[in-house]
Amino acid sequence: MVKGVALTDRRAGAKAGLSRERVLDGALEYLDTYGLPALSMRKLGTHLGVEAMSLYRHVPNKGALLDGLVDRVMQLAFADLQDPPPDAWVPWVRQFAHSLRAALRAHPGVLPLAATRPVNSPDALQMSERWLAAMRAAGLPLGMALDVINVIATFTIGHTLAEVGQTPGHEGTEPDLDQRADELDPARFPNLTEVITTRAGLDFDTRFTAAIDILLAGYAALSRPGAAS
Amino acid sequence: MVKGVALTDRRAGAKAGLSRERVLDGALEYLDTYGLPALSMRKLGTHLGVEAMSLYRHVPNKGALLDGLVDRVMQLAFADLQDPPPDAWVPWVRQFAHSLRAALRAHPGVLPLAATRPVNSPDALQMSERWLAAMRAAGLPLGMALDVINVIATFTIGHTLAEVGQTPGHEGTEPDLDQRADELDPARFPNLTEVITTRAGLDFDTRFTAAIDILLAGYAALSRPGAAS
DNA sequence: GCAAGGATGCTTACAGCGTAAGCATTCGTC
DNA sequence: GACGAATGCTTACGCTGTAAGCATCCTTGC
């Protein structure tokens, strides 16, 4: 190969059609395929047909790229979510929770990032503002509206972390639940063994739904006029 | 300095008093002081007065070290926690939650690890087994006991992630809430502005306590005989 | 038509990372 | 005192994020 010829037959300076959009898209794609630990600037570069340093024209550094990924997934999560109607915040928050969980499960690679990096993008702020306004209009005090959203969001993140950390091949040689059952002494661990054989309490779907409903019922009760304090 | 003289005045092969215990202790200490991104095998080595590769005599690799840290913090979390009494699982789970949160807040560096890495150590298994047995004896069905523990644990992790991700200097130049208030246009974000000025819904303590109590009340209601399904 | 200047991508380079392989020394046991 | 196991050190390799500067292209003004 002639020196100076890059990954593709494009000479230095020629457009590769890169942009912040495309970088983020490529990164999310790469993440979904190969997982978070495999995501490096060089590999993302080759994935996009470009040298690693070219990415820095569109993203200040890797941290900002990861932040962008979180933001993007949040956008996807709530793209189809209308504003909360003024008369029924409970079902709206329920759907908020399920949308968030679905989006996080669809992109498990960003989940650890979403859990760690606070989202402060303008779009996120605007979403929060709209939600707070609408929930307030539905009769919730401002503080309680924020509490509800935050509690639901943090629980959803925590739950989904446990969920995806346990189900797939994950990273490397994490033995999954059924494999570990073989090495579990039924005499010493009767209850754990029974859990694994009967799968009681191992259904993430129903566990999540039940917990969300409990939380919503609780806050709904708190928000009703008769509540003390 | 003479070639061959190591970090301390100890020649190769001489004991440095290293052990898995001391490595983990040192790592946790380093983590609490300098944060997770700063923790490398080399730096931990010098922190312990030892070369990096010496650590590998006591820990198979860095991943195992991190797993060990999570395990250690969990031990600390539940060291003072008795087995659940047969008549009152609700207050016991409440204390479980608060102990877990306290331990995670005491070692924020391990929090992202605890959120990501499932705990499978023998001690953790034994704890779970004992808890399940006792909660069962208290009248909870096995599946619901597991659900309660998992829901409380995952919520606590999610909540504490948000909490510590927002309060301290965090990593680098994350502007904290009050600083961001200045750049927030009150006209476009009236509710967010009001949140920051009145601090309504920003109290992590009461938010956590309230959510835990709601969850516990909900599961207690579900577990009572009259409950359908 | 063409020069100027900004935008884009590439090259090189550096410090730091996890860790495999093998050496040197010391310790525990006979 | 000799020997094998433990322990710690040295060296080395391929990988990472990214700072600095170069080469080329595209756009704009004339």
Image (cartoon, coloured by chain):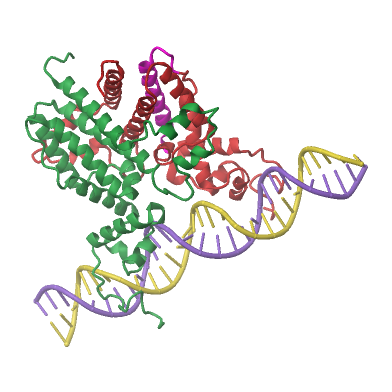
Chain colours: A red, B green, C purple, D yellow
From the image, give the main secondary structure of the stretch colored magenta.
helix
Compared with residue A115, is residue D20 higher up or lower down, i.e. above or below? below
Span highlighted in magenta in the image: A84-109
Compared with residue B138, is residue A90 higher up or lower down, i.e. above or below? above
Q: Is residue B78 visible?
A: yes
Q: Position of residue B204 (x, y in %)?
A: 32, 37
Left/right placement of residue B52 relative to residue A46 reads left
Quadrant of the image containing the N terminus of chain B: bottom left
Indicate whether residue A107 is drawn in magenta.
yes
Compared with residue B96, is residue B5 higher up or lower down, i.e. above or below? below
Left/right placement of residue A4 relative to residue A44 reads right
Indicate whether residue A103 is drawn in magenta.
yes
Left/right placement of residue B129 relative to residue B113 reads left
User: What's the residue at 43%, 31% (across, down)?
Assistant: B195
User: What's the residue at 22%, 39% (across, down)?
Assistant: B98
Q: Quadrant of residue D20?
A: bottom right
Quadrant of the image containing the C terminus of chain B: top left
Q: Is residue A193 visible?
A: no
Numbered-mark total: 0
Q: Position of residue D13 (x, y in %)?
A: 47, 63
Q: Tell which residue pokes out farthest to the top in this image.
A: A87
Compared with residue C11, is residue B148 higher up or lower down, i.e. above or below? above
Q: Position of residue D4 (x, y in %)?
A: 19, 72
Q: Quadrant of residue A175?
A: top left
User: What's the residue at 26%, 76% (across, down)?
Assistant: B14
